[in-house]
Amino acid sequence: MDLGLAGSTAVVTGGSKGMGLAIATTLAEEGAKVAVMARGAAALDDTVQTLRAAGSPDAIGISVDMSDAQSIVAGFDIVGKRWGAVNSLVHTIGPGDGYFEEMTDSQWDETFKLGTMSGVRSIRAALPMLRAAEWARIVTLSAHSIQRQNPRIVAYTASKAALSSITKNLSKSLAKDGILVNCICPGTIVTASFTEVLKDILAADGLDAADPTDVMTWIDNNFGQPCDLGRAGLPEEIASITAYLASRRNGYVTGATVNVDGGSDFV
């Protein structure tokens, strides 16, 4: 299927690792010019090389601190001067987690700064370029936990629920501009960072944190939240649906909150 991304321009925030990197790579493979925003310069350099090899010779990496409003504006200014218009904005930034009793006011503030306000600020900065494009799409990544609560990630989930609500609202206000806006809620996804953080914890139960089936076994055993397919997901499985929603091929899906979670009782 031709997604109509050849020659288009795309920005992926948090695109140097995990789901963001998988999304950026998929867009590059489809022929988009991809700008990735993240903090780490070394990771950005590696990402740009990956994207150029994947099919985006004009790929660029921009160092942006997504917790800082001025850094976000400066990052999008670079995109504007380089391309003028942006067809696809994909926002993937996620904050940390913690139990309610453990979270201080400053931690709540930081979580919302990354989980919600980074999205608000990125979309606001990109809007003039999105409106200048022949066609434009916005996709945000929220979280499965906004519908299936987990006490361990209370602030994270609250910030992502706010982002999901904002995304839905923007689909209404931007419809008049022909800008389609959608939200994806990933379930448990086996990224490199997920495996690194939890490998010893799962190993203590005789499980492999890099194995999607073992990961879902651990999730079910510890949180009682299995999925119908019996395994965790992969970053590439988030990337495929994101690329469609962010593409010209998507001409009629807007205002959707899409679960990509292997099947659950939540809609």
Image (spheres, rainbow, N blue to C red):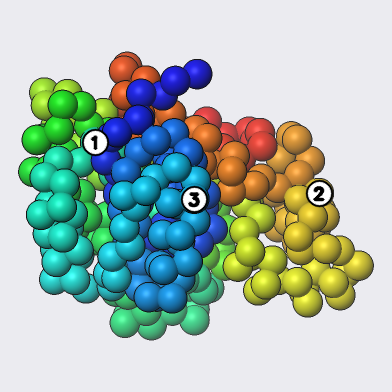
Q: Between residues 35 and 7, which one lies in front from this camera angle?
A: 7
Q: Residue 53 has which mark?
A: 3
Residue 195 in the image: state x and y as whole percent: 69, 66
Question: To which quarter of the image does residue 31 belong?
Answer: top left
Residue holding disc 2: 213
Residue depicted at x 20% and y 41%: 86
Q: Which mark is residue 138?
A: none
- Circle number at residue 87: 1
Q: Is residue 119 left or right of residue 177?
A: right
- Label 3 Cα neighbours within 10 Å, binned few <14 / some 14-19 / many ≥20: some
Question: Pointer 3 and pointer 1: residues touching (CB < 8 Å)?
Answer: no
Classify 156 as above or below 138.
Answer: below
Q: Taking the image as drawn, is residue 257 in sight?
A: no
Of residue 224 and residue 6, the one placed in the foreground of this image is 6
Q: For the residue carrying disc 2, how many other residues have a C-alpha within 10 Å: few (<14), some (14-19), or many (20+)? A: some
Q: Is residue 128 above or below residue 192?
A: above
Q: Nearer the viewer, mark 2 or mark 3?
A: 3
Looking at the image, can residue 201 be seen?
yes
Q: Nearer the viewer, mark 2 or mark 1?
A: 1
Residue lying at 79% horizontally and 55% vertically, measured from the top left: 211
Q: Of circles 3 and 1, which is in front?
A: 3
